Amino acid sequence: MTVNPVGISDLALYVPDPVIELKTLLARRAAEDATLARRLQRAIETTGQQAIRYPRPWEDNATLSAQAAHSLLQRNSSDALAGLRYLAVGTETGVDHSKPVAAYVEGMLQQAGLPVPESMSTFQVQHACAGGTISMLSVGALLQACGRDDESGVVICSDIARYESRTTAEITQGAGAVAMLIEPNPALIELDLRTQGYSSRDVDDFFRPLGSVTARVRGGYSVQCYNDAFEHAFLDHCRRVGRSPHQVLRETDVFALHVPFYKMAITALHRLVTRHMELDGEQFESFMRERGFLQGIDVAARIGNIYSGAAYVALMFSLADRYRTFGDGIVGKRVLIGSYGSGNTMTVVAGRITESAPRVIERWNLDLIWKDEAELPFADYETWMGAPYPVERYRALVDPALIPERRYYLADIRDDGYREYRFKQ
């Protein structure tokens, strides 16, 4: 049986438009508690965060997923839908203990008129922020195993990061979704499924107990766990490649790391590079600059943490920057994805940018997420922080007439708790 190369053919991003600037949040919290204000100011400086994007009342993780998938399939519908075999969502923000987000997304896309087939598998993967990567690799392996070149999968990395209000973790919230088209002979990035590096440990750095809508995080410990897992998985990858850590780092042109907050990604890469390449501070700055690393993660400071999608937002913005810099010279460049999931796991996977990648990247319009940004009254942010809402409260909050066209929305929550979604034409 022929083993086809497999990987990512396209990516699409959806970020909800409401934004709260952290300077606004800091001012409101300072008026309530001066001690908390000082702690928040330190947290903002430590993380490098600037703002939080959060969903409208009628949006949840299923609608975010559907919006990203809709954009992806509209660009690729004639080819991708004809052979679609898998629809997977990696998330830690489920909307039902039994039914996967992927099944809701299937129904929403069909409502919108997209010819999504029923002869496919839908499923959901959870491992904190790593569920999207595990979904991507699983779908890629399934496609590669069948040996056909006319089938595809859609993987969605979608989450809403929520923490308790009036804590330092509040500034690292966020929401968004990245959808990716996974295919044999991919148009964007060919993934190497033979040399993935892994790390897994049973730790309590971050968790969300059953019944809680907000996560619990041990900040400093979680940073340590991320760094240790990254080192372990990276070295595992190097062993499987048969190259030294120094060689792998030097030969990598694009790094896409999980970004729980802006400075975490810099710290993680700095720790790895300085350990294995013996670079000083100025040399490390040059190393990042040559690879457009900061251009990939700048977006995280403005939209916040989107958990399973964070590494792939960084990947999109890095690729867009590298294409602006090199044009068609981007072809053949090497990519390294580092995907961390608290609790914990880390996957390091390598890829190569394909010949058709420039034509894919030039179709993206990543600036749309800034053009759509809307700073709403603080009361809207507080409304979101009060979610989930009792059914009657939700019905009072949402007026379908005010929902923009071409949006998926949570139309109702039945008395038995079932969620009903619609697409506004």
Image: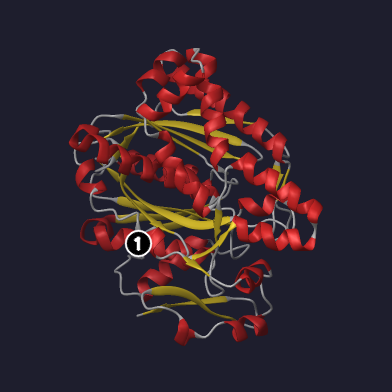
Quadrant position of the N terminus in the picture: top left
Residue at image position (50%, 12%) is 278
Q: Secondary structure at mark 1?
A: loop
Is 133 situated left or right of 38 in this image?
A: left
Q: How many C-alpha atoms fall within 10 Å of the one at disc 1: few (<14), some, or many (≥20)?
A: few
Q: Nearer the viewer, residue 245 or 346?
A: 245
**Left or right: 113 with respect to 60?**
left
- The total number of labels drawn is 1
Q: Residue 140's quadrant in the figure?
A: top left
Q: Nearer the viewer, residue 122 or 56?
A: 56
Which residue is pictured at 54% across the width and 53% down the height? 91
Tell me, yes or no, if residue 417 can be seen here: yes
Q: Position of residue 3 (x, y in %)?
A: 28, 33
Q: Label 1 amino acid?
A: Ser
Instruction: State the residue position of label 1.
Output: 119
Residue 217 percent coordinates (x, y): 71, 45
At x 52%, y 40%, the residue is: 258
Which of these two is toward me, 184 or 406?
406
Q: Which of the image's four quarters has the C terminus?
A: bottom left
Residue 221 as seen in the image, left or right of residue 280 = right
On screen, residue 309 above or below 425: above
Q: Position of residue 281 (x, y in %)?
A: 51, 20
Q: Which quadrant would residue 148 be assigned to in this image?
A: top left
The answer to whether 44 is drawn above or below residue 386 in the figure is: above
Asked if residue 19 lies left or right of residue 292, the reply is right
Visible in this render: residue 198?
no
Q: Give residue 45's position: percent from left, percent from top.
A: 63, 42
Question: How is this picture coloured?
Answer: secondary structure
